[in-house]
Amino acid sequence: VPGAMAAERALAMATCTAPVNIAVIKYWGKRDTDLILPINSSLSVTLHQDQLKTTTTAAASRDFTEDRLWLNGAEVDVGQPRVQACLREVRRLARKRRGGSEDAAALSLLSYKVHIASENNFPTAAGLASSAAGYACLVSALARLYGVEDELSEVARRGSGSACRSMWGGFVQWQRGERPDGTDSLAHQVAPETHWPELRVLVLVVSGQKKPVASTAGMQTSVETSPLLKHRAEVVVPERLTQMMRHIRERDFEGFGQLAMRDSNQFHATCLDTFPPIFYLNDLSRHIIALAHRYNAHHGHTKVAYTFDAGPNAVIFALADTVDEFVEVVRRSFPPAANGDQFVRGLPVGSAVLPQELVAAVVTEPVPGAVQYILHTKPGPGPQLVDDPSQHLLGADGLPRRRA
Ligand code: DP6
């Protein structure tokens, strides 16, 4: 059908997926709030997209009359400065690439309006960091649409600082950089996801969360008021980055886990040192911290390590042979409300019978229903292109498809 052919040519579309990441050396504080340049480098583990991912479709057509954006099916303001910064920067790279080329089709694509639809495969209400995956995915999909193959962590950074780390899989460092224009504030892979096959991640999604202070606002107050944060950025983090890279290289769980816990604790200490103070940890987070330490003390070494971002969900690192037992410890410590929901999700977890001494030493004062569910995952790859056109989130009319 000639009409259909013409419509096809007039509509270009690309779909990508991108992962969530969890920092083990935390980013907290900007030296430039517009360019999103951090006061310290950071290091993270990219989580597997089988459990947590964002999918984004970007389309351009001469028939579109305005740029539009849908998140989880609902239209949102495309004019948000960070979305605009990402759009502008990808288009700038595309123009630079096409510079001097005779590719009229590519050039006209750049002049068309875009429609963008983005979805998470995890409930937004769970309070899992979605902005990192979201901006990494937006930038990946736009880059595909325009045929840009450059290093894109610099662009993702303009969406959300932590998003630059979601542009890579495995173990990722975001180098703070020195230049005022941010061209050297980039993420790069320290080790691929295959480097440490035994490493596992348990996300403990806690119940009844209040919306915490947004990280963007929180970290700015910290930069302005916390002397501890200044010391952390100048002295502590540079030392810890070197140590953490070594622990990862050597697959030293004891070293990795201890340092991850200490760095999470210091990040939350800088929040308390902020004036007025910011509280991201709550009683339940502290309960989980104490549980992890009792568990490690019982075993006489670091078997599990916790880390918390700007919210009360706990992320636990462990080696595969610890998962079954620790999940049972969590189940006994936070007996799930019997509402039929799956308590353990993601990768399979085997059953474990806990020795009586372990229960006596570790499972003190159970808090029923406090943990909503546990998501079992592992390190995973960076953003992926989705080849199958049936997976596009936008239909041939450029509007969101009905969701299943
Ligand atoms: C506590 O990347 O969300 O998760 O750059 O303002 O968008 P903006 O902040 P964001 O901050 C993340 C902070 C953190 C630690 C981390 O991921 O390193």
Image: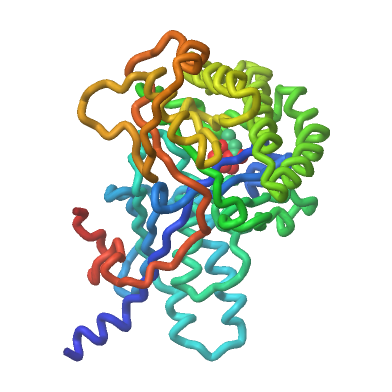
Q: Nearer the viewer, residue 46 or 254?
A: 254
Residue name at image x 75 percent, y 42 percent: 241
Q: Position of residue 22 (x, y in %)?
A: 55, 41
The quadrant where residue 38 appears: top right
- Whole-percent x, y for residue 394 in the image: 28, 64
Q: Residue at 73% x, 28% y: name it.
A: 229
Residue visible at 21% across and 25% down?
339
Q: Can I make out residue 284 in this image?
A: yes
Q: Residue furthest top?
A: 365
Q: Is residue 296 left or right of residue 226?
A: left
Measured from the top left, where is residue 195 in percent x and y? Answer: 62, 55
Q: Residue furthest left?
A: 1
For the N terminus, the quadrant is: bottom left
Observer-nearest of 300 and 154: 300
Is residue 172 positioned above or below 355 on the image?
A: below
- 243 horizontally vs 395: left or right: right
Vertical relation: 21 (above or below) 299: below
Which is nearer the eye, 325 or 170?
325
Of residue 161 and residue 196, the one placed in the foreground of this image is 196
